[in-house]
Amino acid sequence: MQGILERHFPAYRLTHDVPKYQLRAADAMTKCRTAAMGYHASKCEQGHVIDIHYNSCKHRACPQCARIQIERWLDKQRSRLIKCAHFHVIFTIPKQVNLLWVYNSTLLADFFFCAVRDTLFKMLENPRHLGAKPGLHACLQTWGRDLSLHPHIHCLVTAGGLNELGEWVSLRHPGFLLPGKAVAAVFRGKMLYAIRCAIEAGLLRLPKGMHEQGALNLLNKLGRAEWNVHICERYAYGEGVVIYLANYVKGGPLSNGRLISSDSTGVTFEYKDHHDNKTKKMRLKHGEFIRRILSHVPEVRLRTFRSYGLYYRRNKDLLNRSRRHFSQPPVKDPDFLGFEEFLKRKGIERPLICSICGGGVAIIEKHYKRGAPCVLVPVRKAA
């Protein structure tokens, strides 16, 4: 990914209007783990340079340096999970809304999250279904497997919750969360109502050639269509879904491992077609490939992962009360995952003893401003 951006992004920028947040993302991914980002060095007690590593950009869209960020995020989420069954629910908005999404991604993302939250809470807090407040994690993914625009939200929902008396209530039918068609209808109504109010209030940017009445007509048409909400089978624990969601929180839509080739005419990558579950190849010209990658960079301050109900960060008392029901200890923030500990988890050994003098090795951080050159001169052994 880095090599593709280095070679072809300058030409792409000349012919495309690139927003500032996408420019920052491209700049970060291009400079990640290069001299422009500074370095950290392993040195022994006598000052001998053992190893040099250039710093990562830590941008959430960068596929090259996301692993340690994902591990830290996973540690935090694992420490908060209730040891109960969970359901994985996927909400998708129709592709006809994509044109509005391109011009209003942050606003529509907020509408999307609110509609999902309100739909699940309204139905699960109804005594006919659960009659209690559940825990909910929601993660926004804007891409399809072929990098096309496909906004949808993955949800992790507890198979139970706390009622008004503070007692844990489980689902009446352990393997059944909610009726899918009813969930889709409620979600459709809430999402369309939010978009309609934004259009009438003049808060929504309309694409060129689309007038307000045309947008309202589109909403009327979508109100008669079926929307897609998929409720997956019950999971005994939620950790598996959290691991699945972690790949969407950091690292962008395409990992380096899926890139097959890049030459003078285009880029080839592989993806899994969900229609027939077969792995296929797609080839795009460099400009279109870069456009698709950058189109999925979240705007500044857009939170793509949000928690509600028992998992909301300010509901720690409710979360601990739920955990006590399953004989779990109160929530405790995990220890910060350092670089050395991360390498140990991955089975990567680093030198602990200097090969020159036999002294102990330590990590010495050196910070440079972004874009500043970095030159290291190894320290010779003292006479």
Image (spheres, grey):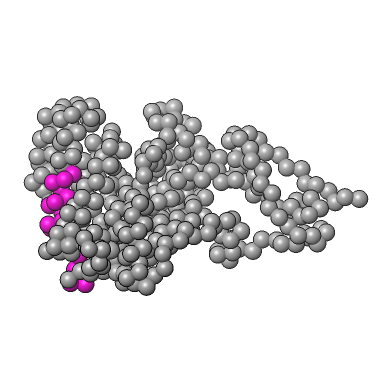
User: Residue lying farthest right?
Assistant: 383
The kind of secondary structure the magenta stretch mainly shows is helix
Residue 84: x and y, percent?
Answer: 31, 69
Q: Which residue is at a point 43% across and 43% down the rendered structure image?
A: 266
Q: Which residue is at a point 48% across and 44% down the rendered structure image?
A: 59
Tell me, yes or no, if residue 95 can be seen here.
yes
The image shows residue 163, relative to residue 377, as above or below, that is below
Residue 232: x and y, percent?
Answer: 24, 64
Q: Is residue 40 left or right of residue 327?
A: right
The image shows residue 323, relative to residue 273, as above or below, that is below
The image shows residue 145, relative to residue 81, as above or below, that is above
Q: Which residue is at a point 14% across and 51% down the rendered structure image?
A: 186
Q: Nearer the viewer, residue 344 or 289?
A: 344
Q: Residue 180 lies in magenta, yes or no?
A: yes
Task: Tell me where residue 122 sits by quadrant.
Answer: bottom left
Q: Which residue is at a point 11% across and 48% down the rendered structure image?
A: 225
Q: Nearer the viewer, residue 163 or 310?
A: 163
Q: Is residue 365 left or right of residue 310?
A: right
Q: Nearer the viewer, residue 372 or 182?
A: 182
Q: Residue 350 lies in magenta, yes or no?
A: no
Residue 200: x and y, percent?
Answer: 15, 30
Q: Which residues, given as a range, are shown in magenta?
A: 173-191
